[in-house]
Structure formats: C-alpha cells, structure tokens
Image: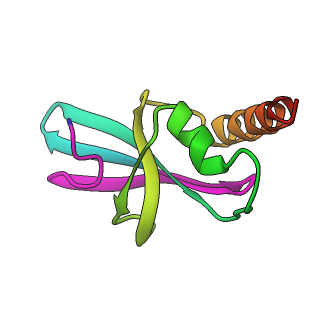
Amino acid sequence: MTNLHSALKTTVVDSHAGDGINYILVRLQNGKDDFADTLHARPNSYSTSGFQTTDFLSLLGFQRSGCAFHGSECFCRQVPEGVNLKGLSTDIGKSFQILSISAQF
C-alpha cells in the first residue's frame, strides 16, 4: 500500500499530542481483509538550529507528504496493528531528546 492517506474506508483510531508532535493513528481499509494502520505525525514546534524533529522522523522511516488528516503536511508511515500510540509517542520523545543531546558533541 503506497498511499497512506486514502483508502475505500478510513477510520481515525486514536490521536495524541506529545513532546512537540501531534499524532493521528488511522486505519485504512481497501478491501474486506485489506487493512493498514498508519501513523501521521505533525511537529508543532520548530527551532532554527540543531537537530530537528523533522530530521528525526525521517530517520524513523516517516515520509513527508500532504495530509488529509492533519489538514496540512505531516510525516507518515505504516505501523503494526494495535500499536500503543501514547507509549510510542513517549518513546519517540525520549529518543529525540537523547539524540539531540548526543548531536551536540
């Protein structure tokens, strides 16, 4: 499945705002047994220097594109079914902080 923003049926499963990124978890259905869970991440804070959230999301396999769910651009990728959005958000936030600190050296 290449288009992570449209399907015969789309269902917003969950959303969460955490650590500078707004997340929307969406289930796409293109057939009776053809489902894909997708995560749409939209950074809500920016800085003019240092390692950027957008760079980190790209390292995690997210791809930048226009987003029907955020109503603007987002970074999206397919995720395993049943992903814990709040836990994933926390882990991404902690990992970004660690990488940002280590990038200063």
| Above or below for 74 versus 30 | below
Q: Which quadrant is home to the N terminus?
A: top left
Q: Is residue 18 covered in magenta?
A: yes
Near-viewer residue (2 or 63)? 63
Q: Position of residue 89 (x, y in %)?
A: 67, 42
**Does residue 6 sit above or below 96 in this rendering?**
below
Q: Residue at x 39, y 42 (%)?
A: 38
On-image quarter of the C terminus:
top right
In the rendered structure, does residue 105 fall within the stretch colored magenta?
Answer: no
Quadrant assignment, res 63:
top left
Query: Is residue 90 toward the left or the right of residue 25 in the image?
Result: right
- In depth, the one of 29 and 103 nearer the eye is 103
Residue at screen point 60% across, 34% down:
84
Q: Please tell me whether the stretch drawn in magenta is mainly helix, strand or loop.
A: strand
The residue at the point 68 percent across, 37 percent down is 92
Q: Residue at x 67, y 49 (%)?
A: 52
Q: Going by the image, does 12 lie left or right of 30?
A: right
The reply, left or right, for residue 32 in relation to residue 22 is: left
Q: Viewer-proximal residue, 68 or 65?
A: 65
How many numbered marks appear? Answer: 0
- Indicate the position of residue 44 as horizontal and vertical percent values: 65, 65
Q: Which residues are magenta?
A: 2-24
Residue 88, quarter of the rendered image: top right
Colour mapping used in the image = rainbow
Expressed as whole percent of the image width and height from the top left, the position of residue 99 reads: 77, 31
Q: Position of residue 45 (x, y in %)?
A: 70, 64
